[in-house]
Amino acid sequence: MVNKVLRQRFNELEAQAKTVEASRKIYHFEGSNDAEYVDNYLLLNWKVKVKNLLSKVCGEKSQHFQQFEKEEEGGGFITNYGIFKSLKAIFLAAKEDFEGGYLSSMKTLVQAEVFDSELEQAKELLSNGYSTPAAVITGVVLETALRELCDKEGISHGKLDKMNADLAKASVYNKLVQKQITAWADIRNSAAHGKPNEFTEQDVTNMIRDVNQFLANYLIS
């Protein structure tokens, strides 16, 4: 769903870029070269939308976003049409990278939607009295999140406990968070081995809530 919406937005803004281009006019100045300009309001409208899209899809620390900001400033004797051509080139590069699946932020957005869907499923199961499968699903989300963090940090995958220890050792999070993850893993393991007497419904409620917060703090933010 996220992928589809963003793809549509890229296409909409590519079409809007053609509208900006179509507003181009040549102005003649006595004693100097002709200059080309586009409608400034159309350009501003397009720039704001593209910048917002790039921040979501590429991230503000990305080469795409930073280069867009740099070119946006212009400078010298460049006209707004010259600025537009540079911005459009960056936008099209981002669109190509997006469509090719080369944007890590896009992967994070899609993964965030998957996590959200799975945690909603866990909540629904819990609300209907199925705390054991709810704990198992939340545990799967947690383990997948740890794998994602390991990928970001260049840490090899392994069992949950090992990834947890390696991530703490790499200072991705502190020892307190490591201990909390171990506690969540214990609940997941008890549920997976059919031992519902080792945890309570409230434990699972807290686990779902806290894993969701963990994702927001360390993976999706």
Image (cartoon, rainbow, N blue to C red):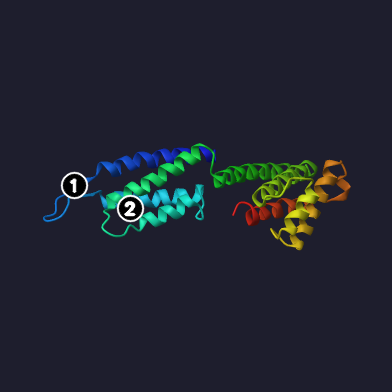
Q: Identify residue for label 2.
A: 44
Is 208 left, or right, of 37 in this rendering? right
Residue 52 is labelled as none
Q: Amino acid at mark 1?
A: Ile
State the residue lying farthest toward the left: 30
* Place of residue 21 in the rendered image (x, y in percent of width and height, measured from the top left): 28, 43
Question: Mark 2 and 1 residues: CB-CB less than 8 Å, in contact?
Answer: no
Image position of 216 (left or right of 130) = left
Mark 1: give few (<14), some (14-19) or many (20+) Cα within 10 Å. Answer: few
Q: Which mark is residue 26?
A: 1
- Report helix, strand or loop for mark 1: strand
Which residue occupies the foreground of this view, 15 or 156?
156
Sequence-first tag of 2 and 1: 1
Q: Residue at x 29, y 41 (%)?
A: 19
- Give the residue type at disc 2: Leu
Instruction: Tell me if residue 5 can be seen.
Output: no
Q: Nearer the viewer, residue 140 or 106?
A: 106
| Front position in the image: 140 or 63 | 63
Q: How many marks?
A: 2
State the quadrant of the N terminus.
top right
The picture places residue 70, in percent across and down from the top left corner, at 40, 57
Of badges 2 and 1, nearer the viewer stands: 1
In the rendered image, residue 75, in percent from the top left (x then y), is placed at 31, 59
Quadrant where the C terminus sits is bottom right
Q: Residue at x 12, y 56 (%)?
A: 31
Whether residue 139 is visible, yes or no, is yes
Please tell me how crowded label 2 is: few (under 14), some (14-19), or many (20+) other residues with Cα within 10 Å. few
Local secondary structure at mark 2: helix
